[in-house]
Image: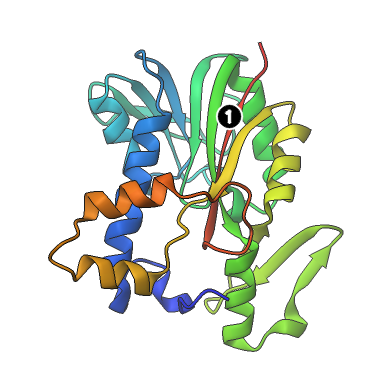
């Protein structure tokens, strides 16, 4: 079970070094995933992600959807020369096969319980050969939250959908790698890979970062070189890369 209290999952508290490491891993995963050529990308992370600026620095144009599925009318404004923010409750403002890549960070597919509907939109607006990078809450995280609150009896389960109550009253949808793969393929996309975002524990990260002989860059490289594909037994989040067939 994951030794991270629910109140630490917002990046505050005593696990500051771990979250520094976590965000460095996210940045490097994104760097490796981003298209090699300048592209039009769509961000569904609700304006809570750091990656649009990273993508813009790499030469890409980004449409950043704010508060995805929680706004009433599309409104487009430029945040910078390469990043444009839009408020919309769906992707109907985009034509079919109009973007090269989509990033759904910040657990958006877990917060949006009907993730299948989001994935239908993702598949529609992606160009053939376009890719999507998706991050969701893992089953390990859900079980840890339930154990911490002694809420085992409150686990809501409909078929294979697993919904877990948080201490603040919100609900998160947690996925196994098998469920994540089914979500991708049911939308007509192909799964490139699925893995835990991180496999190194907070205690390991804290120990390594406190050592003068190790650096954050070395730790991130070690994380990304680890064999974590499809492993459901570690990590608070799963991250997947999907592609739309040509």
The residue depicted at 69 percent of the width and 55 percent of the height is 176
- Say which residue appears at 68% left-offset and 27% top-offset: 190
How far from the left and from the top, in percent, is residue 237? Answer: 53, 57
Q: Nearer the viewer, residue 181 or 71?
A: 181
Q: How many marks?
A: 1
Residue 1 rendering spot, x and y as whole percentages: 58, 76
Image height of 72 relative to 15, above or below:
above
Q: Quadrant of the C terminus?
A: top right
What is the x, y in percent for residue 159? 87, 59
Report the residue at 43% width, 24% height from top: 41
Q: Is residue 150 left or right of residue 19?
A: right
Residue that protrudes farthest toward the bottom in the picture: 150
- The secondary structure type at the circle numbered 1 is loop
Disc 1 residue crowd, few under 14, some 14–19, many 20+, Cα 10 Å = some
Quadrant hosting residue 97: top right
Can residue 158 be seen in this snapshot? yes
Quarter residue 80 falls in: top left
**Location of mark 1 (residue):** 91
Q: Position of residue 172 (x, y in %)?
A: 62, 63
Which of these two is toward me, 148 or 224?
224
Asked whether residue 94 is in view, the answer is: no
The residue at the far right in this view is 159
Q: Is residue 38 above or below residue 121?
A: above
Q: From the viewer's perspective, is 18 left or right of 191?
A: left
Question: Which quadrant holds residue 129?
Answer: top right
């Amino acid at each position: 079970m994951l030794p991270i209290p629910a109140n630490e999952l917002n990046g505050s508290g005593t696990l500051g070094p771990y979250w520094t490491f976590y965000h460095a891993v996210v940045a490097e995963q994104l760097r490796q995933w981003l298209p090699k050529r300048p592209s039009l990308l769509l961000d569904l992370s609700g304006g809570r992600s750091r990656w649009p600026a990273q993508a813009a620095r790499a030469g890409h144009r980004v449409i950043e959807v704010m508060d995805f599925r929680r706004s009433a009318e599309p409104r487009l404004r430029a945040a910078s020369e390469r990043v444009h923010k839009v408020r919309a409750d769906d992707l109907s403002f985009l034509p079919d096969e109009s973007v090269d890549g989509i990033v759904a960070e910040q657990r958006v597919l877990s917060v949006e319980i009907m993730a299948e509907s989001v994935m239908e939109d993702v598949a529609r607006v992606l160009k053939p050969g376009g890719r999507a990078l998706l991050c969701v809450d893992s089953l390990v995280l859900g079980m840890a939250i339930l154990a911490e609150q002694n809420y085992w009896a409150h686990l809501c389960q409909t078929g294979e959908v697993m919904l877990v109550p948080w201490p603040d009253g919100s609900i998160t949808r947690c996925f196994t790698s098998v469920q994540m793969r089914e979500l991708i393929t049911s939308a007509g996309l192909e799964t490139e890979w699925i893995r835990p975002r991180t496999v190194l524990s907070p205690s390991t990260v804290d120990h390594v970062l406190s050592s003068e002989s190790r650096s954050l860059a070395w730790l991130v490289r070690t994380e990304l070189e680890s064999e974590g594909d499809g492993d459901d037994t570690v990590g608070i989040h799963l991250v997947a890369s999907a592609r739309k067939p040509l």
